[in-house]
Image: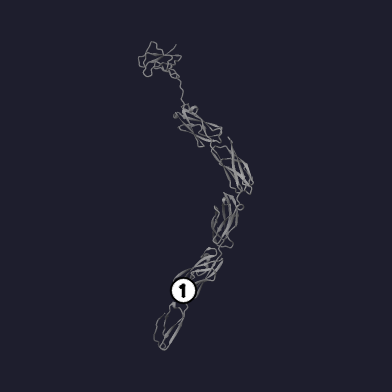
């Protein structure tokens, strides 16, 4: 402490004022001593230290907005303690009369101008609940009370506690479709976030999560695959609770089907015999029905019916005549959620046969073009029709029909027109729906001509017989004429025949040239 003056001289009637400065750290009971020559005067003094501890927040702590909760009935909160920069060190401690309240740290010392965070864990708080948090300044024995409270967290409820596949859900898309409605429990206020889950594989929730407020509800669709016909649970979780919906189902009856022999009639199609039955392990009657796909107008007789466990029946299936290869699916279904039985049916393409192009593969000449006829057919024991198309290795070839469909016991003639420019030959190609290719070779035929004699003699007269006329007195390379008085052609040469017309007499004329010219003399 400091005195403005620590000594002096006093005169009668004249007092002296002494100012004393005492640090706040010396705020304790004590006395000041003033000594004179004849006596000593003690002056006692005391002070009360002002509180320096500050708390934030210093009012009510609302756990629902100021704290966090990771598990039911447990809250984690915090406050900040501080000390006035103008004060001295503050020693403090924290406590609560409410069971299950823990402070970390629970006591400490704060230098002037410093702060410290205190974490508070409140367990076993069955909200709504309240607690008194007490912070004591030890130097002044002053206490600070901070009230704490929590409201009941909104809880989640479901309209269904259990769902049965056989009574509560509809079937479709290879499984079951169920619904439940979520809402806040009665008396709950505020909003909550929720999410859905299940231990069953393949379960789909729609929606799978969301937010609910007071007075609001949401319908959740649940799709359960057909393979999950077993006991299970659908869980809907909020921040305060999880509501479980149990799931169970009885396996649907088992439907069995198989395809027997099929017979074929050209123009009508196939008649097949199938067997449909109910498994012996079934406990209920099976209501079955049929359908076909892949080929139009497949009919079943009967189209459906009822089967007791272990019972079978036969179904006649009519498949209309069609071009092969073809595929169809014969489906046997049940009305009780049975897995449908799909029975495949198919026919293979018959083998296309093609004749040669006209006799000998030779096409006929007709007005500077050639016509070729090819006959297409199927083997007698074929089943189903066959689609075909025609093409040629040569350009300019046209077909009277370039494609078509053949039926068993039926043939089709295809006429191709070939321009003369495509001679001497080529090939026609016939492709069918079975992926086979049949090739037919063709060639151009030879025209026939007729020789006509000339009535008026010319410088050179040459008779053209039907085959080949060659005069004996006309050499091939260098002819040499040997004139006689009366040249007479030989009637029957040994190597080369000579044809003489009945009304025409041929006689050679002697000329001194290198090439003799025969003269035709008509007979009288």
Of the 4 image quadrants, the one containing the C terminus is top left
Residue 481: horizontal and vertical position, in percent? 37, 15
Q: Does any portion of residue 269 appear in the rendered image?
A: no
Q: Does any portion of residue 76 appear in the rendered image?
A: yes
* Residue 124, quarter of picture: bottom right
State how the image is colored: one colour
Task: Say how many tags the image has.
Answer: 1
Q: Residue furthest front?
A: 280
Q: Nearer the viewer, residue 29 or 380?
A: 380
Q: Nearer the viewer, residue 281 or 90?
A: 281
* Residue 451, quarter of picture: top left
Residue 447: horizontal and vertical position, in percent? 46, 24
Relative to 32, does residue 127 appear above or below in the rendering?
Answer: above
Residue 272: horizontal and vertical position, in percent? 59, 39
Residue 126: horizontal and vertical position, in percent? 56, 66
Relative to 192, does residue 272 appear above or below in the rendering?
Answer: above
Of the 4 image quadrants, the one containing the N terminus is bottom left
Relative to 45, does residue 233 appear above or below in the rendering?
Answer: above
Callout 1 crowding tier (Cα within 10 Å): few <14, some 14–19, many ≥20: many
Secondary structure beneath label 1: strand
Determine which residue is flagged by label 1: 90
């Amino acid at each position: 402490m400091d005195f403005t003056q620590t000594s002096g001289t006093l005169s009668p009637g004249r007092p002296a004022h002494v100012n004393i400065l005492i640090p706040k750290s010396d705020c304790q009971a004590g006395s000041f001593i003033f000594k004179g020559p004849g006596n000593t005067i003690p002056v006692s003094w005391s002070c009360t230290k002002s509180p320096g501890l500050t708390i934030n927040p210093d009012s009510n702590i609302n756990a629902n907005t100021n704290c966090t909760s990771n598990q039911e009935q447990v809250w984690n909160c915090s406050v900040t303690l501080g000390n006035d920069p103008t004060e001295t060190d503050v020693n403090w401690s924290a406590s609560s009369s409410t069971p299950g309240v823990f402070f970390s740290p629970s006591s400490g010392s704060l230098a002037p101008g410093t702060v410290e965070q205190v974490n508070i864990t409140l367990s076993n708080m069955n909200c709504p609940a309240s607690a008194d948090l007490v912070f004591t300044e030890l130097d002044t024995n002053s206490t600070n009370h901070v009230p704490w409270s929590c409201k009941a967290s909104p809880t989640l409820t479901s309209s269904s506690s259990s769902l049965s596949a056989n009574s509560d859900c509809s079937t479709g898309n290879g499984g079951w479709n169920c619904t439940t409605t979520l809402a806040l429990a009665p008396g709950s206020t505020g909003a909550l976030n929720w999410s859905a889950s299940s231990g069953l594989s393949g379960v789909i929730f729609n929606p799978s999560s969301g937010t609910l407020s007071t007075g609001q509800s949401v319908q959740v669709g649940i799709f359960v695959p057909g393979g999950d016909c077993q006991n299970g649970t659908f869980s809907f979780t909020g921040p305060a609770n999880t509501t479980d919906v149990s799931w169970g189902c009885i396996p649907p009856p088992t439907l069995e089907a198989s395809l027997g022999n099929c017979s074929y009639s050209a123009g009508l199609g196939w008649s097949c015999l199938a067997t449909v039955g109910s498994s012996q392990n079934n406990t209920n009657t099976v209501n079955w029905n049929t359908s076909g796909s892949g080929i139009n107008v497949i009919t079943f007789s009967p189209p459906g019916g009822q089967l007791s466990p272990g019972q079978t029946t036969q179904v006649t299936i009519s498949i209309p005549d069609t071009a092969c290869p073809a595929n169809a699916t014969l489906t046997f279904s049940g009305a009780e959620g049975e897995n449908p039985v799909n029975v495949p049916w198919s026919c293979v393409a018959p083998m296309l046969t093609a004749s040669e192009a006209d006799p000998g593969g030779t096409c006929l000449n007709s007005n500077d073009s050639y016509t070729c006829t090819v006959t297409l057919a199927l083997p007698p024991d074929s089943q189903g029709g066959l689609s075909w198309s025609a093409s040629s290795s040569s350009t300019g070839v046209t077909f009277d029909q370039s494609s078509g469909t053949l039926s068993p016991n039926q043939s089709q003639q295809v006429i191709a027109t070939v321009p003369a420019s495509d001679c001497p030959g080529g090939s026609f190609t016939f492709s069918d729906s079975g992926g086979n290719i049949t090739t037919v070779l063709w060639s151009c035929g030879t025209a026939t001509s007729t020789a006509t004699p000339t009535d008026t003699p010319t410088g050179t007269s040459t008779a053209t017989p039907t085959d080949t006329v060659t005069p004996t007195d006309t050499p091939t390379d260098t002819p040499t004429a040997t004139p006689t008085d009366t040249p007479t052609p030989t009637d029957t040469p040994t190597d080369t025949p000579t044809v003489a017309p009945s009304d025409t007499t041929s006689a050679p004329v002697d000329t001194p040239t290198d090439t003799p010219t025969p003269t035709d003399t008509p007979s009288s």
